[in-house]
Image: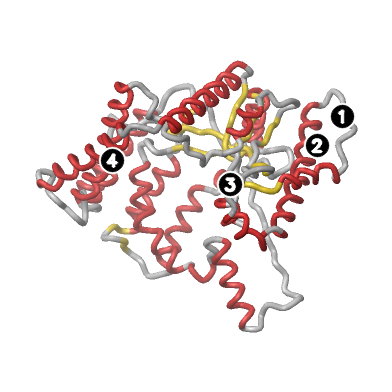
Amino acid sequence: MLEIRIHCKFLPQNFDHLENFISSIDYLPLNNNAKAIEIKNKHFRIIQEAKRQWLNYFLNIYENCQRSSSTKNVIGVSPEPYLDLISNPFDKRQWNYLSFGPSYIRVNQSAIRPKCQQETEIKNQHKDIYSKVENHLTGYPHLIPRNNAIFKQYSDHLLNYLNQSYFTPLTYKDQLISREQAQILGSIRRIIQNMNLVIRVTDKGNNFYIGSVGEFEQKAQKFFSDTNAFIELSYNPFNEILDKVIQLLNTLRGKDLIRKWQYEQMMPDRTKCELAHLYFNPKTHKDGIPVRPIESTIHASTTKISKFLDKILRPIFDDKCKDTTIIDGAFLITELSKYNKKGLLKPTTRFCTFDIRNLYTMLPQEESLDILMTFLHAHGYRKVKGISIDTIKKLASIILKDNVFAYG
């Protein structure tokens, strides 16, 4: 199915006749827009699931479809957005563009920008890529000096590549496509802004959710009230947290509890740090469309400590828990096959699944830290990469407890 989804972008037009076989919605509740929208989307999901079943029947002729160059009498099967509105405010072109989904990359979107904008983008990309490569190679374990000639060579090659990528002339056809897509995208943005709509990537859906800002904010507020795990602060604690992180690392380094290269990897850059940001993705596969919180911590004060601990602790966890951890669907199928060959998979075998609501906010912080210490002790670790587990606990503690974000 994944191969079909990627390579076979079209279905025969008669797939649309399925909608005539499924009962239409003759009655919708009055004065209850939320319920009406829910009924319409459930009806749409039934049709989509039936089309997936039909697609399975067409797998046998997939190769023939790929060899045919004709695209007449076909319909698109890109994942359509989830519309949490009574009526669709988008025209056919806009809706088809939204149906490409969040993974779609617009054709040559930078080629139609003014040259000054392209030069600025090249400069920013060059700086970002070069700094990441340089920091990686000058750090442990490579320790290449920053004045090494290889960095100048890499910088020149990178700049030449970016210039070539941005300034290579487009064909007339590609120029038309780029301009058309830019116009469609601009019209979509104006509708979203003028109608006070919100567009988000769905949780586990790989498509867009479109709804009203007011109703989406109600879902977010319901999450806050249900979890009761957040406190709204009357001041900005950014400087306080940053100073606390720097003080902890200076103290640990001063006592020689962490090495110099470890200290440098975990030290935040005051000029680039900012508070984490919280946003929500809608769970359109669940009734009522609850939301999943996503905390963007890419520039947070504790992010470098978090990344460092993940790098040294995750290999230990993966190794010690590999027999009881399911990585993905393919891994599960492989393990079930082994289970079956041992004669253990029987008609009476039961599969149990469960879902933990709001897992992160339910975890007691002190207990979580104690579990981490117990896990390392149980597997014979007193130090990891030269760092004592007591020091690891202090580093993990500041990540968990000094977790502050901006919202709204």
Residue contact at pointers 1 and 2, CB within 8 angstroms: yes
The crowd level at tag 2 (other Cα within 10 Å; few <14, some 14-19, many 20+) is some
Query: Does residue 247 show up?
Result: no
Between 313 and 244, the one nearer to me in the picture: 313
Q: Where residue 218 is drawn, which disc sits there?
A: none
Q: Which of marks 1 and 2 is nearer the N terminus?
A: 1
Mark nearer the N terminus (3 vs 2): 2
For this orientation, the residue located farthest to the top is 194
For disc 1, the marked residue is: 29
Q: Do the residues labelled 3 and 2 touch (CB within 8 Å)?
A: no
* Residue 233 point in image, percent of width and height: 49, 26
* Amino acid at dot 4: Ile
Query: Do the CB atoms of the residues marked 4 and 3 lie less than 8 Å apart?
Result: no
Give, as a three-letter code, the residue at label 2. Ile
Give the residue displayed 65% in from the left and 23% down from the top: 214
**Residue 407: x, y in percent?**
51, 28
Q: In which quarter of the image is the N terminus?
A: bottom right
Q: Which mark is residue 129?
A: 4
> What amino acid is labelled 1 in the image?
Pro
Q: Nearer the viewer, residue 144 or 124?
A: 124
Q: Mark 2 points at which residue?
A: 39
The residue tagged 3 is 362
- Mark 1 to mark 4 CA distance (whole Å): 54 Å
Mark 4 element type? helix
Mark closer to the chain start, 3 or 1: 1
